[in-house]
Amino acid sequence: MRIKKELTDSWRRGQRGWPASYPVAQLPNAPLLFALSACLVAALATGSLHAYARAAFYAGLAAWAWAELATGDNLVRRALGVGGLVYVVINIGIALGA
């Protein structure tokens, strides 16, 4: 039980970000972890699995970017959200042949 408590405490500290007064660095949250996992699957897969994993990556990244833009703790985090959304829109546009 002690290891579980230590891991839980570490996770919570990581979610608050660093530095505490103006958090810029933070452990990945659920949408970003999902996007990174999908990116890994897309890198390792071929065919339709690659396409679905890539779509899941863009969906997860868009969810993370929107959350950062809407509820980011400071301007740096909100700017990261804007950058993430711009990246997703540009890459989906390229994939659709725009």
Image (cartoon, rainbow, N blue to C red):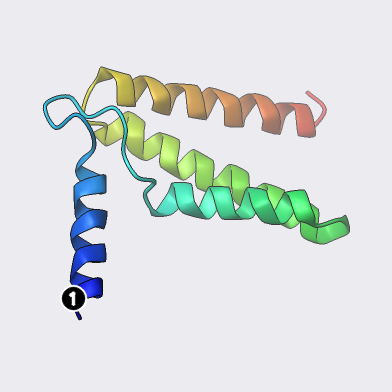
Q: In which image quadrant can residue 27 be found?
A: top left
Front residue of 85 and 76: 76
In this picture, residue 33 sits left or right of residue 24: right
In this picture, residue 67 sits left or right of residue 85: left
Q: Is mark 1 on a helix, strand or loop?
A: helix
Q: In which image quadrant can residue 4 be found?
A: bottom left
How many marks can you see? 1
- When the figure is inspected, residue 82 is found, relative to residue 3, above or below; the finding is above
In this picture, residue 54 sits left or right of residue 61: right
- When the figure is inspected, residue 48 is found, relative to residue 2, above or below; the finding is above
Where's the N terminus, which quadrant?
bottom left
- When the figure is inspected, residue 30 is found, relative to residue 66, above or below; the finding is below
Name the amino acid type tagged 1.
Arg
Residue plotted at (77% across, 55% down) = 44
How crowded pointer 1 is (Cα within 10 Å; few <14, some 14-19, many 20+) is rated as few
Residue marked by disc 1: 2
Where's the C terminus, which quadrant?
top right
Image coords of residue 58 (percent x, y): 60, 42
Which residue in the rendered view is the most extreme toward the left? 21
Residue plotted at (75% across, 49% down) = 43
Front residue of 18 and 96: 18
